[in-house]
Amino acid sequence: MSDNKATLTVGGDTQDYAIMDGTVGPQVIDVRKLYANTGMFTYDPGFTSTASCDSGLTYIDGDEGVLLHRGYPIGQLAEQSSFMEVSYLLLNGELPSAKELDEFTRTITRHTMIHEQLTTFYRGFRRDAHPMAIMCGVVGALSAFYHDSTDINDPEQRRIASHRLIAKMPTIAAMAYKYSVGQPFVYPRNDLSYTANFLRMTFSVPAEEYEVDPVVVDAMDKIFILHADHEQNASTSTVRLAGSSGANPFACIAAGIACLWGPAHGGANEAALNMLREIGTVDRIPEYIARAKNKDDPFRLMGFGHRVYKNYDPRATVMQKTAKDVLEKLGVDDPIFDVAKELEQIALNDPYFIEKKLYPNVDFYSGVILSAIGFPTEMFTVLFALARTVGWVAQWNEMISDPAQKIGRPRQLYTGPTQRDYVPVDKR
């Protein structure tokens, strides 16, 4: 708590409000007693100027292009760590020792199977159902099968539920894909890594063994790391809000998946890839660049710039190299990848893009990579949800353990009619 105070004067009455310090980042004004002192609320649509909690998980400095998990820069984690190691870090606060990482990985591996009755849930969906619709339903249904880990007041049950969610999400996601293409489900294998297991469950068929490509595994692991957590975004705030009511962890994560499904949140990489397909060929790029610069044209380049990052997206630096490695290794012959590479170079060198800070972001590169690997665009947000489950679970655990946590109850500025009397229908 800072010694400084913020002073607010309302109708001649002056109130002082404490200023709180984080370890890094801007100070915040503690307005918890504002209504009691003044009879007024703050007005902040989208809560973009309001801290809903204090958290020790993730720090973002959008102006400087900084993203830290528990203090570690995202670039270092993506280049030197693994998704399992980052998962342990987010859940426990520190990087694991070799023994701790081995035990954690073994625990997650042993939880990757799902209850066999859950497989019958998929048959209740149409074959053309969006995979995110399936994810919402199946993840929410986990609470009907794992009653021994729904007591949020028991730390051990919270730990088991956390491990189950992280472990089962790849299996559930792979099954959603298999169901959509009419192929049999593939069960997990305990001798494979978390990411390799997911790729095998997604792309293998009983007729032949699936060869796990280490370049693809490394790329997917990096994508998972880069999407693991991103502070108090819409879906994370949804998980916390649902959790504040005491809802079980499976329901909370299902709520997060539902929020992530929105195109303004989780669908950015799909939108970026669709834009590349709309452009189609390299020779049409100048036309679309001109449209992007035209203020009167509603067209916008997707995958460039970021709402939070006013500088280069630190995750995009990692994805840029990964995209090149994957495209080179797989040798995919698709004109949209030529469009992506040319558009990237223009954006990095064109004064208009540099001035507006419209750098390629993580969604631009991840969409290109996922498409090259073979994922259909409707699976992109599912993969986002798979990776973000770790962050959601860590945020949920932090919230449950916070003694200052209260049930979420945003206030409003009422603009409807004042009180009026009911008029019987025959007199209206």
Image: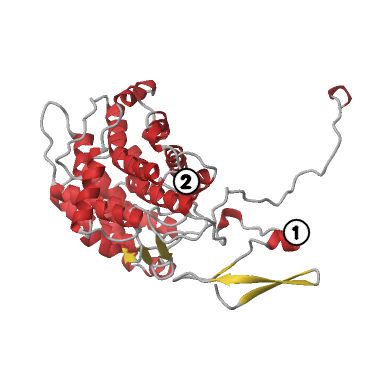
- The mark tally for this picture is 2
Compute the Cα span from label 1 to label 2. Answer: 30 Å
Q: Is residue 405 left or right of residue 354?
A: right
- Element carrying mark 2: helix
**On residue 196, which mark appears?**
none
**Residue situated in front as seen by the camera: 205 or 149:** 149
Q: Residue at x 54, y 56 (%)?
A: 404
Q: Residue at x 27, y 24 (%)?
A: 182
**Residue 106 spot, x, y in % from top left:** 21, 45
The amino acid beneath tag 2 is Val
- Residue carrying label 2: 239
Up-down relation of residue 16 to residue 228 (above or below): below
Q: Residue at x 34, y 21 (%)?
A: 123
**Residue 265 spot, x, y in % from top left:** 44, 48
Up-down relation of residue 145 to residue 153 (above or below): above
Q: Residue at x 81, y 44 (%)?
A: 418
Up-down relation of residue 205 to residue 327 (above or below): above
Q: Is residue 19 left or right of residue 232?
A: right
**Residue situated in front as seen by the camera: 241 or 161:** 161
**Residue 159 spot, x, y in % from top left:** 36, 45
How are the residues colored? secondary structure
> Farthest residue toward the right?
427
Disc 1 crowd, CA 10 A, few/some/many (<14, 14-19, 20+): few
- Residue carrying label 1: 39
The amino acid beneath tag 1 is Gly
Q: Is residue 151 left or right of residue 411?
A: left
First reached walking from the N terminus: tag 1 or tag 2: 1
Instruction: Confirm whether residue 285 shows in the render.
Output: no
Quadrant, the C terminus: top right
**Residue 114 spot, x, y in % from top left:** 29, 31
**Circles 1, 2 touching at the beta carbon (< 8 Å):** no
